[in-house]
Image (cartoon, grey):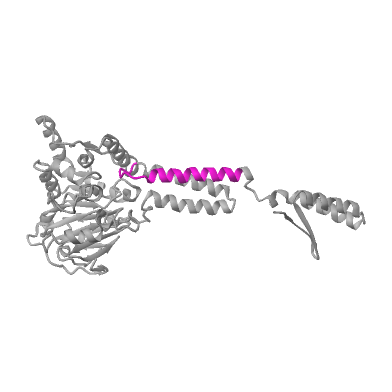
């Protein structure tokens, strides 16, 4: 980036209000998650947000991944995650393609209209746009925000909400030239300027290859940014991070592990997790924070440490803990670490983001079991601790024989110990012994 600054202000300066002041008339919550929408990292934000929904229907819109052959499994895992981890029953609203049957279509739209919370996540943004465009879905999503509902879009679904969307698969996987596709443009009216949303903003899967900014990298994002109008804002949300736009309070709260970035023409303002920013300041790229009394921070901000940002990170940390326990021959510590990893794998099992981290974690778990088995075969207790009573008894007998000048018995005891791999050394303070390598 050509420039970046981190927002650390403590007072709200009001900023520049959106040109039409549209957000002031809204009453709902717009929640953008960069990734991890069904991971342990987002459990607390989901719980707090869903508490605001009350008894209104909570629905999962399956469109973004509707083309996948495992779509049913993704839906099932998501429903299980919200039931088991978040403590909320949700229902699946299937709109994999616009229903051709009139009754089926109207039933789906009625469900969407009645829902107090609408959630969509992983998949393909361009596929979702094709299925939603020229239907009532975009208007109903926008209406949800006007009517005090919650729209929680993550990953691929989040990309669709702006004036333009990144065709991620087409660029990153298929090698199509970088370009924008028209988005639903649901959120621009909330800020009074064109808005583009980019999740996975801090992605680092490429290692030395730059995969930030939803796999674009700096070079491609800069080139694409030049095609946008000068006033367009890019809202970048890091992985395992949520930004909660409270449209009634006029605030944006940053939750989770990462940051929220406002970028315009390469210049960025970065808001760390825990920040609460006035929405009115965002249109100007402002960095002013709002007083905590104004923001609903007590409703949605986590009050204890956030879990590991990925299953791989958790497995790597536990592998180091296991190695340390193994070096100490701490069997209880080894077993506890194995159980912790198994539980974390269960916690992450509902994550609908497709990756090979589950297999990696299983590999670490299997390795731990094998290494613990090798320790058991060799004997986990220090051999000195096991042999100490017997060697001490023999050394006492040897000392008595030497006192009685029975050197034959004394030498026999020493030779027997040596044959067993125990070296005896006579010192001024008495005999000492060690195991021969």
Residue 198 position within the rendered picture, expressed as x and y whole percent measured from the top left = 22, 55
Q: Quadrant of the N terminus?
A: bottom left
Q: How far across and down, in percent of the image, does residue 100 sit?
A: 11, 31
In this rendering, position of residue 298 left or right of residue 18: right
Residue 290 is situated, as x and y percent measured from the top left of the image, at 22, 65
Side of 412 relative to 52 (left or right): right
Taking the spot 30% from the left edge, 54% from the top edge, the residue there is 239
- Residue, x 59% and y 53% (percent of image)? 328
**From which residue to which does the magenta span run?**
350-376
Is 391 placed left or right of 275 in the picture?
right
Please name whichever residue, 36 or 245, is drawn nearer the observer in this view of the structure.
36
Residue 352 on the magenta segment:
yes
Residue at the far right in the pictured view: 405
**Is residue 296 visible in the rendered structure shown here?**
no
* 180 relative to 107, above or below: below
Q: Is residue 42 above or below residue 276?
A: above
Quarter of the image for residue 399 reads bottom right
In the rendered image, the quadrant that contains the C terminus is: bottom right
Tally the marks: 0
Q: Is residue 16 visible?
A: yes
Residue 282 part of the magenta segment = no
Residue 324's x, y, as percent? Answer: 54, 54
């Amino acid at each position: 980036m050509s420039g970046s600054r981190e927002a650390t202000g403590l007072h709200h300066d009001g900023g520049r209000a959106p040109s039409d002041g549209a957000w002031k008339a809204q009453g709902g919550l717009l929640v953008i998650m960069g990734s991890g929408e069904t991971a342990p990292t987002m459990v607390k934000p989901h719980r707090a947000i869903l508490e605001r929904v009350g008894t209104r229907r909570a629905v999962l819109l399956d469109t973004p991944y509707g083309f996948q052959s495992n779509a049913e499994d993704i839906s099932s895992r998501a429903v299980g995650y919200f039931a088991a981890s978040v403590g909320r029953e949700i229902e699946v609203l299937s709109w994999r393609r616009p229903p051709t049957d009139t009754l089926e279509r109207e039933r789906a739209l009625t469900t969407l209209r009645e829902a107090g919370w609408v959630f969509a996540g992983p998949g393909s943004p361009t596929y979702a746009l094709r299925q939603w465009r020229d239907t009532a879905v975009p208007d109903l999503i926008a209406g949800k925000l006007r009517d005090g509902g919650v729209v929680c879009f993550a990953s691929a679904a989040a990309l669709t909400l702006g004036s333009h969307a990144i065709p991620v698969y087409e660029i990153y996987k298929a090698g199509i030239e970088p370009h924008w596709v028209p988005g639903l443009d649901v959120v621009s009216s909330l800020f009074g300027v064109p808005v583009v949303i980019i999740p996975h903003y801090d992605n680092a899967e490429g290692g030395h290859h730059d995969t930030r900014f939803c796999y674009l990298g700096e070079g491609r994002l800069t080139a694409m940014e030049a095609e946008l109008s000068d006033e367009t804002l890019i809202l970048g949300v890091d992985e395992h991070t949520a930004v909660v736009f409270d449209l009634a309070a006029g605030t944006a709260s940053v939750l989770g592990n990462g940051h929220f970035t406002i970028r315009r023409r390469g210049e960025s303002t970065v808001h760390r997790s825990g920040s609460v920013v006035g929405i009115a300041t965002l249109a100007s790229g402002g960095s002013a924070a709002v007083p905590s009394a104004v923001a609903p921070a007590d409703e949605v901000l986590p009050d204890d440490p956030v879990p590991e940002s990925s299953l791989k990170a958790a497995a790597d940390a536990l592998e180091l803990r296991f190695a340390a326990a193994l070096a100490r021959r701490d069997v209880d510590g080894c077993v506890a670490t194995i159980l912790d990893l198994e539980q974390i794998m269960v916690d992450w099992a509902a994550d609908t983001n497709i990756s090979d981290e589950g297999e990696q974690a299983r590999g670490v778990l299997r390795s731990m079991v094998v290494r613990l088995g090798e320790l058991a075969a060799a004997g986990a207790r220090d051999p000195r601790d096991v042999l100490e009573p017997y060697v001490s008894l023999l050394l006492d007998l040897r000392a008595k024989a030497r006192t009685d000048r029975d050197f034959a018995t004394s030498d026999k005891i020493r030779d027997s110990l040596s044959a067993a791999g125990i070296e005896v050394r006579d010192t001024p303070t008495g005999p000492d012994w060690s195991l021969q390598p």
